[in-house]
Amino acid sequence: MIEKINLLEEKLAPIFKEVDNVCYINSKKVLDAFHNNKLSEYHLNSTTGYGYNDIGREVIEDIYKDIFKSEDALVRNQFISGSHALTVALFALLRPNDTLLSITGKPYDTLDEVIGIVENESSLKSFGIKYEQIDLENNDFNYDLIKETLLDHKIKVIEIQRSKGYSTRKSITISSLEKVIKFIKNIDKNVIIMIDNCYCEFVCDKEPIEVGADIAVGSLIKNLGGGIALNGAYIVGKKDLIKLCAERLTLPGEGKEVGPSLGANRNILEGLYFAPSVVASSLKTAILTSLALEEEGYLVEPRYNDIRADIVQNIIFNDKNKLIEFCKSIQASSAVDAHVVPTPSYMPGYQDDVIMAAGAFVQGSSIELSCDGPIRSPYIAYMQGSLMYPYGKIAVINALESLKKSKN
């Protein structure tokens, strides 16, 4: 099997070179932001209690502003997850009788109860906030319906989820995002465009704020944490919107001025430093997985030579047992808990049982090698991550061998 994989790597060499070029651009972007903000050893220190005058926390947010080309940033270890940061942003931006519109179909499962798609007394719906959605059409935005909705309804916030989540659609590239933002702003320049950027950071050389988004949200235990940040998330965008988000996370009148770093500054900064390289390793692992599984006759999305928007690789098994077997093999190739056998089970925030291979140093860290999927047709494995490409390569080899054995 190793010989076959080595041959596939030769075929992928030009694509891997492009990944390395983007890694260089984003690495320079990070280093320039560190230098522009005069990052110093004392910024790595910590605060407790209220977190007043946390200069490390402040420089982190200035660095994020530079990288994302945004007016302001909120980067906090008080965020539990990317879904939590999205929730904070939605509750910050929307008021009773406002309408939230998703133009990429139903958002990720963990937002069902946040929005009120699934009934919950703490949802946006329970506060009188309305929700509408427009599905993609042939993996592209439904421009006619978007225009009709904006002209017929007063929409406060448009949410765009770039990564596919547990859907079967394609993820949203930065060029596709730029096109739809221009289209929307020509119809209603005041509507707030909010991007769920999870899994997408540093995959290309631009980020959503650079192409006209008002606000973007992501997790630190995915791409930008580099496998080193222990928790947290970020929100970047317009200054007035970030102020609202900060006051929803903490409290009105104090906003960004409070929130102790509790020792997180070093991990957040070091993780960001490694992030371009880690994302490149994840992309190479995904690309190799795509080609190797396609060669074995499995359906994959994206294909190895497609333009990528995120680090997620889908393998469509159309077979429950093969999905489970594949996830088991990824768990067995993990650094942590490799001896544990994952089984489908209920997880909070999801409507189906989920199998999750996540042998990680940081619990739930998707940028580390992981693979998961809901137990529902067409039985898709959503694979992402690998802090270092050689470990990803080993996992691909082991997964192929495991699938071959399961056929016998």
Image: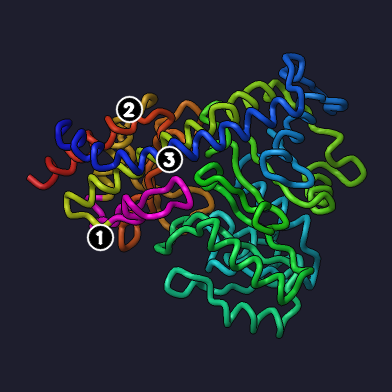
Residue on which disc 3 sits: 19
Q: Earlier in the sequence, mark 1 or mark 3?
A: 3
Quick check: is 308 in the magenta stretch?
A: yes
Foreground disc of the pair 1, 3: 3
106 left or right of 391 in image: right
Q: Mark 1 falls on what kind of element?
A: loop
Quick check: is 117 in the magenta stretch?
A: no
The label number, if any, that marks residue 390 in the structure image = 2
Horizontal and vertical percent for residue 406? 14, 44
Foreground disc of the pair 2, 1: 2
358 left or right of 219 in image: left
Please tell me in which quadrant of the rendered image residue 298 appears: bottom left
In the picture, which quadrant includes the C terminus?
top left
The magenta region covers: 300-322
Foreground disc of the pair 3, 2: 3
Q: Mark 2 falls on what kind of element?
A: helix
- The residue depicted at 11 percent of the width and 47 percent of the height is 407
Q: Amino acid at mark 3?
A: Val
- The residue depicted at 74 percent of the width and 47 percent of the height is 70
In this orientation, which residue lies closer to the viewer: 56 or 342? 56
Horizontal and vertical percent for residue 303? 32, 54
Residue on which disc 1 sits: 318
Q: Are marks 3 and 2 in contact (CB under 8 Å)?
A: no
Q: From where the camera sits, is residue 270 visible?
A: yes
**Mark 3 to mark 2: distance in Å?**
15 Å
Where is 327 relative to 54, above or below?
below
